[in-house]
Every structure is written in C-alpha cells, then in structure tokens.
Amino acid sequence: MDLKHAARRIVALSAALGAALVAAPSASADDQVVTVVSEADRAAALAHWTPERMRQWVGDEDLPPAEKIGRVWEGPVPPGVGRLFFTAEPGVDGSCTATVVPSSSKDVAFTAGHCVNGGLDRFDRPIKIVNVVFVPGYDRGAAPHGVFPARSFAWSSTYSGPMSGSDDDAVIALDPVGGRHVADVAGTQDISFGELPSTVDTTILGYPVSRAAGGEALFSCVRPATREANSVTTTWNTDCDLAGGSSGGPWLRNFDPASGKGTLFSVTSRGTMTEDGVTTDLSGAAFTEPVRKLYERAGEL
C-alpha cells in the first residue's frame, strides 16, 4: 500500500486504491515527467491551505490507532524536514512528508513519487494534483519558516505510479517566500546514492495522520533498515509503524541527534496495514541511477 493521507477517512491506501490520485504533467523530458504550476495556481494553493485546513484531521475518530514503535519527535524539527500538503481534484485534501535537499537553486524538496503521482482512477482517468505546498518545520499548526508553494514537481519516467515500488521518488521545486529560498531558511539534509551495506541504522521521520496527533507532530522511528532485492525492485525495509501521512519522509543514516542532520538514502514508500488500520512495516525504494539523474537536474526546475 502507499502511505498517503488522501482523505479524512482514508489514511493508508492499498496500491489499488492509491491509483485514485495523479498529477497531470504539463511538460516532460526523455528521462523525467515534469508538472509546471502556474502563478495563479500557486496563489490558489496558498489561499487554500489556511492553518485551520492544515489541522482538519485532528480528532477524527476514524484515523488509525496511535503508533507504538514511532514516537513524537522531541525538540526542534530537524533541518529541512516538513509537511507536504496537496489536493487531489475534485477536492480531496491530503498530506505527505518531504525534506529539503541541497540544490543549485536552493528550492528543492525530496519526497515520494506517489505523493504527487498516484496513477489513474477506476475509469482510467487521471486526477490532477493541485494546491501543493510545503511547510518546513511544521509543528502543531505552526509554520516557523513559512509556507512554500510548488512551482513544479517531477518524477523519473521509470516510475509507473503507486502500483510500482520502483523509483517511488519525486522532487519538488518551491517558490521563494519573502525573497528567501527554502534551503536558506529551513536548512537541508544531505542525500547519497552510493553503495551501502545490507543493514543500515536508520532514523525515519514523518508526519503520520493517526490518532496520536492527526499529522500535527513529527514522529520518528530509530530502527535497522535491511535491503531486499528481487527481480523487479530493491527496497529498504523496517518494522516502523508510522501511519499514512509519513509517505515521502526521509530515511537518514549517520544521524546526529544534536544537530538533527543525517544523510537521506531512501524515503517512505509503502507499508503493510492490518484490518484495524495499524501499520506493521514500512519500505522505501532503493535509489537508482534514474533517481540520481532526477535529483541532479532538480535545481533546473
């Protein structure tokens, strides 16, 4: 399933249900799919996401149970980490997690591909993703660094949507706010694409939309991640139990709790959920060469 909060009463979606959300790309390149957001639509996104709307899921009794392994993050939100909000037309609000990463433009956040591309609806029609904004450092309704609208977002052409666990990654180019770039005001997390051992001590961060906080607080799991490969895909896997809304959240190695800095090597992509809505495990796609190229070109968006 894809861990994307897609509606008030739908928090963690199976791959089949996740196919109900998709962005409508307005530009493309040979190796990536790019959606460009007009200035009018960016303004509409900022108007849509009022503080009250951002907190709309708090107290919803139909949310999944509170996490048992994941814990509320104590202290300031680590550099670059924040909550990603969006609307899937016709009017279903949702949220994910994203992280600011180094780029030439200082405007780039990294998240899961299915947060901005969810496939097709049951009639094979694309549903447009709109009102995309990123709030770094989000904490219980507070936006300490501002609200940054997306001017474009992209995924690798090798990512085929939520039915696939391969290359489930996306980059988002954000407008500066008050003349300041998101990397300058919120900081960044490093990102790496090199070979790693089969087990990595990992700090996983995300904004789960569960009964614990309704997406209002950052949660973390500190768990070993193990690499598993088959003929189709290579993934990192843990028993972290963060609920929907944690999709796109960073998997960080060499994490320093004092500085809040680490190195991103995957993002939350998929998970297993019981009939009671409890997440039992998470996985993230291992970065590939197409994803590395996607990231390297992100500063041009």
Image (cartoon, rainbow, N blue to C red):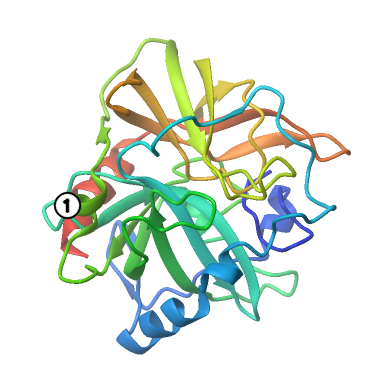
- In which quadrant will I find the C terminus? bottom left
Residue 160 appears in the rendering: no
In the current view of this chain or complex, which residue is farthest to the bottom? 40
**Occupied quadrant, residue 27:** bottom left
Residue situated in front as seen by the camera: 97 or 34? 97
Q: Residue at x 54, y 51 (%)?
A: 140
In this rendered view, identify the residue nearer to me: 188 or 264.
Answer: 188
Count of residue discs: 1
Residue 78 visible in the shown view: yes
Residue occupying image coordinates x 57% and y 71%:
87
Q: Residues within 10 Å of mark 1 (few under 14, many from 20)?
A: few
- Which image quarter: residue 36? bottom left
The residue positioned 55% from the left and 45% from the top of the image is 247
Image: 274 above or below 167? above
Looking at the image, residue 247 sits to the left or right of residue 17; the answer is: left
The relative height of residue 138 versus residue 228 in the rendered view (above or below) is below
What kind of residue is marked 1?
Asp
Q: Which residue is mark 1?
A: 184
Q: Nearer the viewer, residue 86 or 49?
A: 49
Q: Is residue 37 left or right of residue 20?
A: left
Expressed as whole percent of the image width and height from the top left, the position of residue 171 reads: 34, 54
Give how far across and how far down residue 300 sits, in percent. Answer: 16, 62
Image quarter where the N terminus lies is top right
Q: Residue furthest right?
A: 275
**x%, y% of residue 44?**
44, 84
Locate residue 121, reporting x and y percent: 69, 70
Query: In the structure shown, which secondary structural element does the residue marked by tag 1 occupy?
Result: helix
